[in-house]
Amino acid sequence: MPPKPPKPRRCCGIYNQIRAFFVQSIANGAIQISFDVEIPFSEVIAPVTYYVDSIDWFDDRNCVIITNFNQDLGVSDSAWSCETLNLYFVGNLQESAWQQNN
């Protein structure tokens, strides 16, 4: 009997793109990644950057990425679902080797 084909990912393409970028960046020595979103109902004209610190911040079951607005490690204050990513994601994926001083 031939093996079953892999199950298709049920998360949106943007979610999968950000998650794959995170996995690759961490393997390359980064400690966090960031991406930009546009928030049209805010007074901020430029895209806003959000950070992801841990693979645990990717909720593959619900297709939600836990994020933080500041670059502080280990602090989450926001989340992005596929629905909101599809509306507001503008790209600019970046990895960071920034280290928090304790």
Image (tube, rainbow, N blue to C red):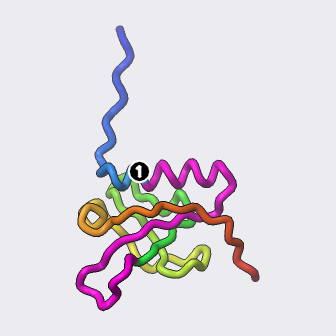
Residue type pointed to by label 1: Gln
**Residue at the farthest front position:** 46
- Tell me the residue at 76%/82% (across/down): 102
Left/right of residue 74 with respect to residue 10 in the rendered view? right
In the rendered image, the vertical position of residue 28 relative to residue 101, given as above or below: above
In the rendered image, the vertical position of residue 56 relative to residue 73, given as above or below: above
**Residue at the farthest right position:** 102
| Quadrant of the rendered image containing residue 98 | bottom right
Magenta segment includes 27: yes
**Residue at the farthest top position:** 1
- Tell me the residue at 38%/16% (across/down): 3
How many marks can you see? 1
The answer to which of 82 and 87 lies nearer the viewer is 87
> Which type of secondary structure does the marked residue at label 1 adopt?
helix
Magenta segment includes 95: no
Q: Where does label 1 land, which residue?
A: 17
| Quadrant of the rendered image containing residue 44 | bottom left
| Quadrant of the rendered image containing residue 77 | bottom left
- Tell me the residue at 24%/66% (across/down): 87
Mark 1 residue crowding within 10 angstroms, few (<14) / some (14–19) / many (20+): few
Left/right of residue 50 with respect to residue 95 in the rendered view? left
The answer to which of 76 and 26 lies nearer the viewer is 26
Q: Give the range drawn in magenta.
A: 18-47
Residue 47 % position (x, y): 38, 76
Residue 60 % position (x, y): 39, 53
In the rendered image, the vertical position of residue 55 relative to residue 101, given as above or below: above
Residue 74 % position (x, y): 59, 74
**Residue at the farthest bottom position:** 43
In the rendered image, the vertical position of residue 46 relative to residue 10, given as above or below: below
- Tell me the residue at 36%/62% (across/down): 64
Q: In which quarter of the image is the N terminus?
A: top left
Left/right of residue 2 with respect to residue 101 in the rendered view? left
